[in-house]
């Protein structure tokens, strides 16, 4: 009788295990990470004037060559700039504009702007996702007093929204670019 009870328990456990297994054959959608070789920020002064271009290009990706980082000029004290970010994949011809994909997937992305070294500027988001949370491919930057330091742009994929900044955003970094900036 013990053998029958044991056998019945074993059969029941096997059936329970098999019936609880996942029969869902639906493939999981894979959202491959974008290749970003060129990151360009254009800062156009309100009221006109020459735009300041911040750019980093890394055409060999993780290859032996370091990215080429350029800043076309200095910011002017007291001036507000309209900022626009463009992300390109220049490993293909013609280059692919990754900014379009980031903006289409606004709910899954957010740019963060981080200041370092005493740089006196303030930033504000100008574009948002459908829930009203910041995206940040467009922004304003206001230059304060004469100063210098770093300005880092970080694009997070699947951050927690809303958030109070990069520190609690979570997600994964798609790209981070740091520029040495001077306000004069």
Image (tube, rainbow, N blue to C red):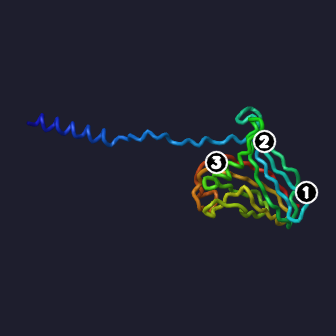
Q: Is residue 47 above or below residue 66?
A: below
- In primary-sequence order, the first of circles 1 and 3 is 1
Q: Quadrant of the N terminus?
A: top left
> For mark 3, what is the residue?
173
The answer to whether residue 31 is left or right of residue 176 is: left
| Residue lying furthest right | 49
The answer to whether residue 147 is left or right of residue 35 is: right
Q: Position of residue 128 (x, y in %)?
A: 67, 61
Q: Position of residue 105 (x, y in %)?
A: 63, 52
Q: Residues within 10 Å of mark 2 (few under 14, many from 20)?
A: some
Disc 1 element: loop
Q: Nearer the viewer, residue 67 or 27?
A: 27
Q: What residue do we see at 75% from left, 60% from top?
A: 139
Query: Which disc number belongs to residue 50?
Result: 1
Q: Quadrant of the C terminus?
A: bottom right
Answer whether labels 2 and 3 touch (C-beta < 8 Å).
no
The answer to whether residue 57 is left or right of residue 77 is: left
- In primary-sequence order, the first of circles 2 and 3 is 2
Q: Quadrant of residue 63?
A: top right
Q: Position of residue 92 (x, y in %)?
A: 74, 35
Q: Residues within 10 Å of mark 3 (few under 14, many from 20)?
A: some
Q: Residues within 10 Å of mark 1 (few under 14, many from 20)?
A: few
Query: Which disc number belongs to residue 57?
Result: 2
Q: CA distance from mark 1 to mark 2?
A: 22 Å
Answer whether labels 1 and 3 touch (C-beta < 8 Å).
no
- In primary-sequence order, the first of circles 1 and 2 is 1
Q: Nearer the viewer, residue 165 or 29?
A: 29
Q: Quadrant of residue 16?
A: top left
Disc 2 element: strand
């Amino acid at each position: 009788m013990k053998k029958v009870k044991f056998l019945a328990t074993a059969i029941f456990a096997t059936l329970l295990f098999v019936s609880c297994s996942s029969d869902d054959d639906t493939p999981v959608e894979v959202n491959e990470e974008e290749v970003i070789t060129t990151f360009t920020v254009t800062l156009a002064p309100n009221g006109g004037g020459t735009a300041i271009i911040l750019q980093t290009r890394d055409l060999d990706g993780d290859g032996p060559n370091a990215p080429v980082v350029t800043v076309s000029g200095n910011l002017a004290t007291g001036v507000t700039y309209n900022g626009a970010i463009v992300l390109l994949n220049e490993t293909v011809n013609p280059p692919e504009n990754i900014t379009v994909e980031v903006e289409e997937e606004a709910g899954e992305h957010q740019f963060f702007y981080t200041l370092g070294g005493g740089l006196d500027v303030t930033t504000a988001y100008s574009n948002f996702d459908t829930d009203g949370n910041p995206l940040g491919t467009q922004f304003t930057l206001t230059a304060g007093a004469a100063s210098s330091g770093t300005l880092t742009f970080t694009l997070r994929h699947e951050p927690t929204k809303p958030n109070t900044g990069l520190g609690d955003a979570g997600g994964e970094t798609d790209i981070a670019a740091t520029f040495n900036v001077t306000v004069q």
